[in-house]
Amino acid sequence: MTPAESRAYFERYKDNPVPVGKYKEKKMKDIVQVRTKETGLEYEQHHVWPVAQSREISKVTGKQYKNSAVIPLPLKLHQAQGRKLIHKRNETLKPQNPRESLLQGVQDTRQGLLDAGCDRTKTNEACLEALKKIKADNPEGFSGKIPPKP
């Protein structure tokens, strides 16, 4: 998706450019279905906290984290630049604790949306909403360090 196309996409949906919901929830499926029909684009549900990172953190901390907060994005946007637009540091940096991992996911999502041309206020609101959903789904919190490797 070119920068002009992504800006046009976000302009088209300026009232709610990045709806936040739960993975595979009916509400998200309905939004994707409507937007697919309107734009002709394929969509993916972007996890604000990358699944690979939340699983990795769970392996080393022994805690299971719920990670279902998603934003539906056009496939071309979600996969743009070899997944580096929205997932800048997903495969390269290894967070040292659960809180850092979550922060990295939210920061990458936010910066990717801004770089793609999404309105700053709407982006911030969506990221905050997603963060609140993730924290509400995990009342035990995100404390603790990842133990060093032997």
Image (cartoon, rainbow, N blue to C red):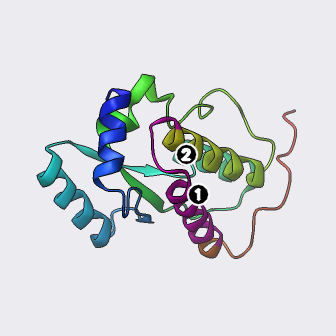
Quadrant position of the C terminus in the picture:
top right
Residue at image coords 19%, 42%: 41
Is 48 placed left or right of 72 in the picture?
Answer: right
First in sequence: mark 2 or mark 1?
A: 2
Q: Quadrant of residue 53?
A: top right
Q: Amino acid at mark 2?
A: Thr
Is 33 placed left or right of 44 in the picture?
Answer: left
Q: Which residue is mark 2?
A: 109
Q: Amino acid at mark 1?
A: Asn
Q: Which residue is mark 1?
A: 124
Is 127 placed left or right of 5 in the picture?
Answer: right
Decide: few, some or many residues near mark 2? Use Cα within 10 Å; few <14, some 14-19, many ≥20: many
The residue positioned farthest toward the top in the image shown: 81
Residue at image coords 53%, 52%: 48
Q: Which mark is residue 26?
A: none
Image: magenta residue range: 115-135
The image shows residue 73, relative to residue 115, as above or below, that is: below
Residue at image coords 49%, 43%: 113
Which dot, 2 or 1, sits closer to the camera?
Answer: 1
In-front residue for pair 138/82: 82
Residue 123: in magenta span: yes
In-front residue for pair 118/18: 118
Quadrant position of the N terminus in the picture:
top left
Element on which disc 1 rests = helix
Element on which disc 2 rests = helix
Residue at image coords 36%, 48%: 10
